[in-house]
Amino acid sequence: MATTELKKPLRGIVPPMVTPLLDRDTLDVEGLERLVEHILAGGVHGLFILGTTGEAPSLGYRLRRDAIDRVCRQVAGRVPVLVGITDTAFVESVGIARHAADAGAQGVVLAPPYYFPAGQAELLEYLQHLVPELPVPVFLYNMPSLTKLNFEPPTVRAAADIPGVAGLKDSSANMIYFHQLQGLFRDRPDFSLLVGPEELLGETLLLGGHGGVSGGANVWPRLYVALYEAARARDLDRVAALHERIMRISSTIYSVGRYGSSFLKGVKCSLSLKGICSDFLAEPFHRFRQEERESIRKHIDALESEP
Amino acid sequence: MATTELKKPLRGIVPPMVTPLLDRDTLDVEGLERLVEHILAGGVHGLFILGTTGEAPSLGYRLRRDAIDRVCRQVAGRVPVLVGITDTAFVESVGIARHAADAGAQGVVLAPPYYFPAGQAELLEYLQHLVPELPVPVFLYNMPSLTKLNFEPPTVRAAADIPGVAGLKDSSANMIYFHQLQGLFRDRPDFSLLVGPEELLGETLLLGGHGGVSGGANVWPRLYVALYEAARARDLDRVAALHERIMRISSTIYSVGRYGSSFLKGVKCSLSLKGICSDFLAEPFHRFRQEERESIRKHIDALESEP
Amino acid sequence: MATTELKKPLRGIVPPMVTPLLDRDTLDVEGLERLVEHILAGGVHGLFILGTTGEAPSLGYRLRRDAIDRVCRQVAGRVPVLVGITDTAFVESVGIARHAADAGAQGVVLAPPYYFPAGQAELLEYLQHLVPELPVPVFLYNMPSLTKLNFEPPTVRAAADIPGVAGLKDSSANMIYFHQLQGLFRDRPDFSLLVGPEELLGETLLLGGHGGVSGGANVWPRLYVALYEAARARDLDRVAALHERIMRISSTIYSVGRYGSSFLKGVKCSLSLKGICSDFLAEPFHRFRQEERESIRKHIDALESEP
Amino acid sequence: MATTELKKPLRGIVPPMVTPLLDRDTLDVEGLERLVEHILAGGVHGLFILGTTGEAPSLGYRLRRDAIDRVCRQVAGRVPVLVGITDTAFVESVGIARHAADAGAQGVVLAPPYYFPAGQAELLEYLQHLVPELPVPVFLYNMPSLTKLNFEPPTVRAAADIPGVAGLKDSSANMIYFHQLQGLFRDRPDFSLLVGPEELLGETLLLGGHGGVSGGANVWPRLYVALYEAARARDLDRVAALHERIMRISSTIYSVGRYGSSFLKGVKCSLSLKGICSDFLAEPFHRFRQEERESIRKHIDALESEP
């Protein structure tokens, strides 16, 4: 296994890969292979599997381990692979992390345990117990809408002193929070601050954030990489134009049906329409029906015919 | 294994048993045995393991299976054993349910998958897929504060038509909701409606509910059984007196420290002080420190010295 | 003006009267007169005007003063009149309270200022400043869903020591909270604890609460008074039967259209159908349209044809 | 009265002025005059009085009218004056708007009625009734944390077709929402999109927003104007530097005491320390105590000694 040293800070576009499925307990193995190659061909800077977009909590452990093995083997060190290890049970998080490290993953990603909401002191103590058990660096994952718990800025700052904590991915959609973290980490340029929602990628990069975990990069990886590069080049007009393009994706592809899960359904449906992988979703969700699929098809046609 | 037929509707006091632990991945086996006998000696009508009070989401799967085996073996059909199978992953819920049935459990208890909040139509579809896979009857578990999702009354009414759905335990603490369900199930006297929070047990029983899943019955099982019997006897004064006693437990034992987890810590600490089992809690929680333990001791002394 | 001494504690059914309107700034004066007589004929123990059900926050101050004058004059001491004085501005609350006292009202009702959510210490300080300015006793009004602020039990207990604070009306729909307050006020039998949602009136009265501020008593005042009397007589079967009847009202009359405002629309529509007063609602709400009105008519017919 | 034509779209920095008070019902008239001059000297593009920062909901109507008269007279057309008319009562909103127009205000600002949360259809209907009654253009004000109601993007787009609706100020702190609105209004370059939280001013201006309603501009108006100008000049480095400066204000001046009201207290305390106006706050808030005041003083010293 080729090893890829994880750069500090991790920068760039790290797509949260969907998990292609044939049914609730079977990987779409061929789709998975095509998807990995499709994303890597876009020039991304890492790959994050088994996160929220990867439906990890909805997948059985056997299947998760299978996905880790296959992705790590296929990526083969071309970019760093990060693996989601979020779990309500401490011992299961550790188990997945060890499996990921053995398979060659360069890092893991951890949201708080999401059944019982811990207090901030308990959350810090949890990290102090857990992180030393992890064989690879860990990125914290702030996802309050699903975990019922915010990583308060002082908690993040304290957690960053635990050896092995390499950064934070923020999916709160709260840019005030993100800027507060940037302020707290001005003395820690090695600590990676990544944004989840791609609608906020433009401003994140313009104002000093390190990158994004952009779900749309499953489908159009080059677009997000282009935005990253435009921001690095300080090309404000190009950032604005690419940001608008992402907003059009968001207001079309991710808005069909107005489900809580429209984003996930829209991404998987788009990948299916493009012939990359299956659009099966694990319970409690289900794939788009024919009418919604037609909407997605029209939106893709419109988006891809734009200059 | 002696078999206990599950009565329809299930009635009475079904304590949600705590899971005695020596550390995060080790059962307190002797404590578990003492606890089962302590609870059963109180005359309870069933035993519910691996629920919220049982910290199930915080426990590894190996330990959960061990707990199921030991409890079923020890109870040996004296009362029905219900096993929590709530999981974010469909296949893991099925796996635990099969293990529970094989071990002799009479039923299982299921809250919605709690990472991704499903819509009501998705929730019903999830149940339509899952319940036929379960080898024993299932009780739905409404716990919106932790699952971010309410079982809306029409969803419950529709789910009750799936063969195998035997009742619902409501931990919403919303008695309007509970009364709405009672109205919807007036034509289904076999469908069990149980209340979670013991502070609401008195009114639940006075107004036609079938029973309670009362956490305090880990420590004082006879008290909750006495309330159940007083309500069956229509002895309003005695119900009021026992309800007040439960409110005193709630405002003392469950209110030390004002944590989100004070209830759980208070119950485990009380059991430890009474010599029944360890008070270790799995991450992200931790047991009470010495000062809080002293408070609990004083509260127990005061409560038990009352007439 | 006949004066009615306010009993301590205030007990019984105190309907929160709707405000009959011809348009957004004009009272339905004749409807108001009929409504007052209709309610009083039901044997209620008080009348609460300009609360949430009275749409007070949606009404201009001139109209509110007009309503106070007319109701106090018409009731003429037959029962105590309570007037809602909740306002975001301290000086406006005091102004309405003085007007109410001058008109002959026996008490006022106050929820926290509802734009800026105060902390508990600020809330207590606010009451310590405001209550001494009020010329008549005040009932606190816990309505967290609309004020974004809960009267925490210790705050209520401390506020009860301010001379003039006579009780609390709880519309949180959280019976655990209500029972906690009952526990805190066991030494203060003069402090009135009233429940808002009528779906919880049965259990409130069975377990020691003093009464209810039941919106349905605008339409069917005798029903709520009958439940109060059945509970006083410890007639558990009759309480359960009347409670079920109220639940049927709730699941029909208050559930048409599934608006946030369905309760208010249902009550006003019912009064209109019974020829008592207009069903006009102030912005931001509007009366039921014809189809919904037909639903209400059918529900009323079904309810009133029951034995 | 000199008249200032309201430009379309309104652009730039429009500070939400605090209301200087001597006590809960008395304006600090001299402080008010100094404050207006202080802000205008900073080169701002408008002045917004009686908003959230202006504590309008906590102030009596007499005082609000007095404030409108004084500010309009003093500004005397140098910049447009916008007046908050948000009210739970339709007729009171209209009354304040007429008073403001008579006094010479160029526009009004309206959040939804904030006691009863309307549905989106009701909110649109409310605007369709209200806006034609207003004598000057109106800016919608999205403030979901305090009104419990979000102006959904389709509602805003529909409302923008009512003659007189000139723009929207968004205080949701949700930049995804803001970008969605920008997308919907690409064909309406006259419709002003302003951001509330100053922590988001940098990105708002870089990505096409028209300006900000920045509370800190009460104290340091030039800073916010400088950020606006740097963004107009596409000077990304300077925007980033000024944004960081604002973040330092936010994490110091607005974070003392960690109250919900820390922002408001910090701004008024800063103005008091700088000798501009009183720091009295209307109920339910109160000014900082001595210790907190000392913290603010130190923070100001540190901020103002930076290069």
Image (spheres, coloured by chain):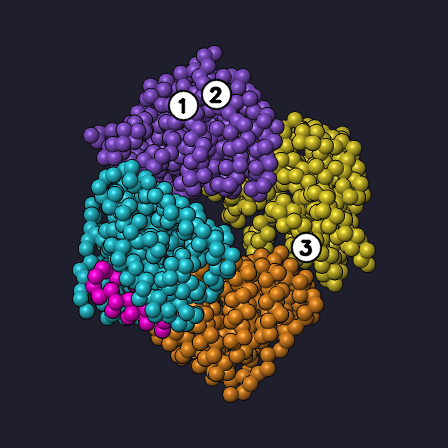
Chain colours: A orange, B cyan, C purple, D yellow
User: Identity of the amino acid at label 1?
Assistant: Gly
Q: Please state which of residues B104 and B95 is positioned toward the viewer in this rendering.
A: B104
Q: Is residue B78 inside the magenta stretch?
A: yes
Q: Which mark is residue D50?
A: none
Q: Chain of mark 1?
A: C
Report which quarter residue C128 is drawn in: top right
User: Identity of the amino acid at label 2?
Assistant: Gln
Q: Please state which of residues B7 and B121 is positioned toward the viewer in this rendering.
A: B7
Separation of residues labelled 1 and 2 (CA atoms): 10 Å
Would you name the residue on which mark 1 appears? Answer: C46
**Residue numbers of the magenta segment:** B60-87
User: Identity of the amino acid at label 3?
Assistant: Ser
Given contact means CB atoms under 8 Å apart, are the residues at marks 1 and 2 in contact?
yes
Separation of residues labelled 3 and 1 (CA atoms): 51 Å
Q: Which mark is residue D251?
A: 3
Q: Crowding at label 1, few (<14), some or many (≥20) Cα neighbours within 10 Å? A: many
**Rendering coords of residue B169 (x, y %):** 31, 53
Q: Please state which of residues A80 and C130 is positioned toward the viewer in this rendering.
A: C130
